[in-house]
Image (cartoon, helix red, strand yellow):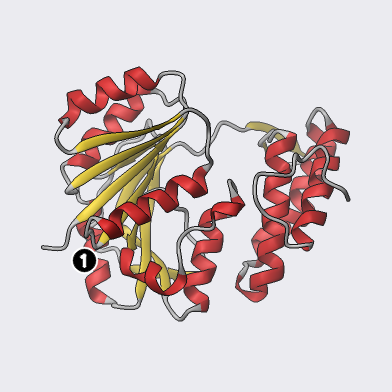
């Protein structure tokens, strides 16, 4: 297709070997690739890698500190708009897309003019091999992750950009809810594949069932609950029941049963929930000082 595509990879102390595989898989499928670095200690290696892969089409934006995922995504949308790109492909540092992924996602956009964002629906662990599918189709959703998703840039003229005040967590969810609220569609395509690190949780057992223990830090839990409560209050019915279950029942129980620093984490959780109810945003209130 003739419309230009910009890709953006957000980095923070990435594994250089995985990032190299990520860039090499992506650059052949897009017009230009932006690496937005959030204060990585191995920044010089990232710069060397960008030059090695394709110094004319891969460029790096460096920051001295971690500005958050939301600001990085918002930067990508603004850059794409000002430079005349029709689509923005967003990637995590540990995402590797299949060789036909962008073509599949682009075709999906052509099929439905109201499709604002579409993601890869065929997901693998990093150590798995792709089993490429030819017959996938669009599955409409209320939310998708930004990793491996293609965004129609002109939609930002209607709904605005990513909400930078969320900083981290629920950033992609809130953006999807806003699209749907404005009448656009969100989906994923089963024919588009990507490898993606799912995290490294500890696995515990409760009776016959495996329990994944994520061990989020107290600060991370503050943002999860603050932004989650904010979205619940603002978007209500759009939020899937399974996400409510995880937020209000599963995650607190896992912390109580299996994690360390229980009191500190539960206090952060409660503070985040209280500030989300008040619709407080931003990265300006330290979670330790936020009032319940």
Q: Is residue 178 above or below residue 219?
A: below
Residue at the far left in the pictured view: 2
Q: Is residue 63 left or right of residue 205?
A: left
Q: Where, by quadrant of the figure, is residue 22 drawn?
A: top left
Q: Is residue 135 above or below residue 89?
A: below
Whether residue 149 appears in this view of the structure is no
Q: Where, by quadrant of the figure, is residue 24 drawn?
A: top left
Q: Is residue 211 left or right of residue 87?
A: right
Residue at 54% across / 60% down in the picture?
A: 173
The residue identified by callout 1 is 107
Residue 95, image x, y percentages: 37, 39
Residue 34, image x, y percentages: 29, 41
Q: Residues within 10 Å of mark 1 (few under 14, many from 20)?
A: few
Residue 78, image x, y percentages: 36, 55
Q: Is residue 102 left or right of residue 252?
A: left
Residue at 36% across / 50% down in the picture?
A: 76
Total numbered labels placed on residues in the image: 1
- From the viewer's side, name the closer residue of 134 and 192: 192
Residue at 50% across / 44% down in the picture?
A: 69
Residue 252, image x, y percentages: 80, 46
- From the viewer's side, name the closer residue of 243 and 276: 276
Residue at 82% across / 29% down in the picture?
A: 261
Residue at the far bottom in the pictured view: 183
Whether residue 76 appears in this view of the structure is yes
Q: Is residue 56 above or below residue 76?
A: above
- From the viewer's side, name the closer residue of 47 and 247: 47
User: Which part of the image, by quadrant, shows the N terminus?
Assistant: bottom left
Indicate the secondary structure of the residue bearing disc 1: helix
């Amino acid at each position: 297709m003739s419309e230009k595509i910009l890709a953006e990879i957000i980095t923070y102390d990435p594994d250089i070997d995985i990032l190299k595989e990520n860039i090499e898989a992506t650059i052949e499928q897009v017009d230009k690739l932006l690496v937005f670095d959030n204060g990585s200690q191995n920044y010089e290696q990232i710069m060397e890698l960008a030059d090695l892969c394709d110094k004319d089409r891969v460029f790096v934006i460096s920051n001295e500190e971690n500005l958050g995922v939301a600001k990085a995504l918002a930067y990508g949308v603004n850059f794409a708009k000002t430079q005349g790109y029709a689509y923005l492909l967003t990637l995590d540092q540990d995402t590797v897309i299949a060789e036909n992924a962008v073509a599949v996602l682009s075709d999906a956009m052509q099929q439905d003019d109201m499709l604002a964002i579409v993601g890869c629906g065929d997901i693998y662990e990093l150590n798995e091999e792709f089993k490429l599918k030819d017959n996938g189709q669009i599955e409409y959703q209320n939310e998708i992750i930004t990793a491996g998703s293609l965004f129609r840039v002109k939609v930002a003229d209607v709904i605005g950009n990513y909400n930078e005040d969320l900083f981290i967590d629920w950033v992609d969810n809130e953006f999807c809810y806003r699209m749907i609220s404005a009448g656009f569609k969100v989906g994923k395509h089963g024919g588009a594949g990507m490898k993606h690190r799912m995290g490294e949780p500890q696995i515990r057992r409760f009776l016959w069932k495996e329990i994944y223990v994520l061990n989020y830090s107290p600060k991370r839990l503050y943002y999860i609950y603050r932004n989650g409560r904010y979205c619940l209050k603002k978007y209500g019915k759009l939020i899937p029941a399974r996400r409510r279950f995880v937020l209000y029942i599963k995650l607190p129980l896992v912390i109580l049963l299996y994690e360390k620093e229980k009191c500190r984490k539960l206090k952060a959780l409660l503070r985040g929930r209280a500030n989300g109810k008040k619709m407080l945003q931003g990265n300006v209130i330290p979670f330790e000082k936020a009032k319940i």
